[in-house]
Amino acid sequence: MKEISSKAGLLLQLREKQGSPVSGTVLAKELGISRVAVWKTVQALLEAGYSIETKDTGYLLDPKNEKDFLYPWEFMQRDFLFFHHKNTGSTMDRARELALRGIDSAVVSADRQSSGKGRSGRTWISRQGGLFFTFLERPRLAVADYNLHSIIMQIALVRTVSSVCGKQAYLRWPNDVYINKRKIAGVITEISGEGDLIKWISLGVGLNINNHIPSGKAASCAEITGRNLSRRDILISLLEEAEKIKKTFSTSAVYSQGSHALANEWNSLSDCLGAKAVVFEPNDATQTGNASVHKSKPEKILARGIFEGIDPIGRCILKTKDGKLFFNQGSVSLAFLNPD
């Protein structure tokens, strides 16, 4: 097993003491480093924003003053996978840069995004306290099957949000998670292909956790539970849930014809099957807390009908008076006229 960094090890030691001081001598022995190295590590953590007190008997980390950090060392042995930014344009852009550098797998997070990305070129305004990250990987998949990874992440989001909030969350095509009929999360996808195979794929996730939501059309985990939650713990749970789903459906025919099992699972978690809906080409609205706040051109309606869920490759199935129509995510969206 990979050894943890000195920052991770020092935090682990201080947290285990639950507010009691730990001497520099003990820390040096436990971490296998010098006392000078212990001091330098403490200074680095202080600069990063941790509230570590220096007392006559050692160093103390007060549990009541703990902050919600997403630094790589917060993830212990997996720290090499994590890249965190206090402020950045978009985690999707940072993930693309890592992919072009040859990185195989990464989780890129940010406390704030100045140019967060929504679907169809929309801007996602990312406020402090939300969980904004992009998961980069290089799956052995055909380009035609890229949406399967988005489906997995969407299912993982619903399961995680439901567990955290104590209320059932639901999926709405193409990429949204709702709870109490209000949007709480979304997923976007970017891929790079070579021939008919995927070179890399990145899944961007925006989940409202502790961030303030000004619009009544959206919700946050903190609002629903009545308390602030750990973004780190939720991110760990979400990634573990996604891995669990991959293993559960690993025997499905995901490489050539999509996955009937995954589609059935997605459909079981949607609250709009049987609802009247319209498929349309979205405008370039700005999104804030998952709610559109600006429109620059009217939306073009492509079809009307009854939403029947998704097929094995993630396409929307719309039953119309002339038969069933299938829509890829691409640049189209779906609006429900009577969601229950």
Image (cartoon, rainbow, N blue to C red):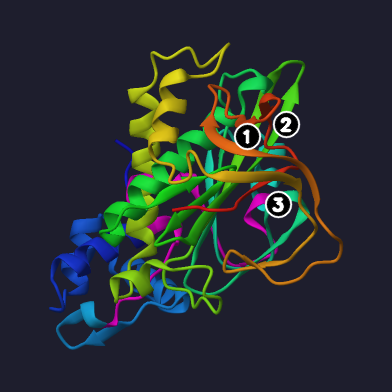
Which comes sooner in the sequence, label 1 or label 2?
2
**Left or right: 136, with 331 as reference point:** left
Q: Is residue 77 visible?
A: yes
The residue labelled by disc 1 is 201
The residue labelled by disc 3 is 93
Q: Secondary structure at mark 2?
A: strand
User: What's the distance in space between the residues labelled 3 and 2, CA to CA?
Assistant: 13 Å
Q: Secondary structure at mark 1?
A: strand
**For residue 83, above or below residue 287:** above
Q: Give, as a single range, the part of the protein colored magenta.
A: 65-92
**For residue 136, above or below residue 8:** above
| Position of residue 165 measured from the top left corner of the image (x, y, whole percent) | 30, 61
Q: Which image quadrant: the N terminus?
A: top left
Q: Quadrant of residue 304?
A: top right
Residue found at x 68% / y 22%: 143
Residue found at x 44% / y 42%: 270
Residue found at x 49% / y 52%: 339
User: What's the distance in space between the residues labelled 1 and 3, CA to CA?
Assistant: 12 Å
**For residue 112, above or below residue 95:** below
Which comes sooner in the sequence, label 1 or label 3?
3
The residue labelled by disc 2 is 192
Is 90 contained in the magenta span?
yes
Q: Secondary structure at mark 3?
A: helix
Q: Amino acid at mark 1?
A: Ile
User: What's the distance in space between the residues labelled 1 and 2, CA to CA?
Assistant: 6 Å
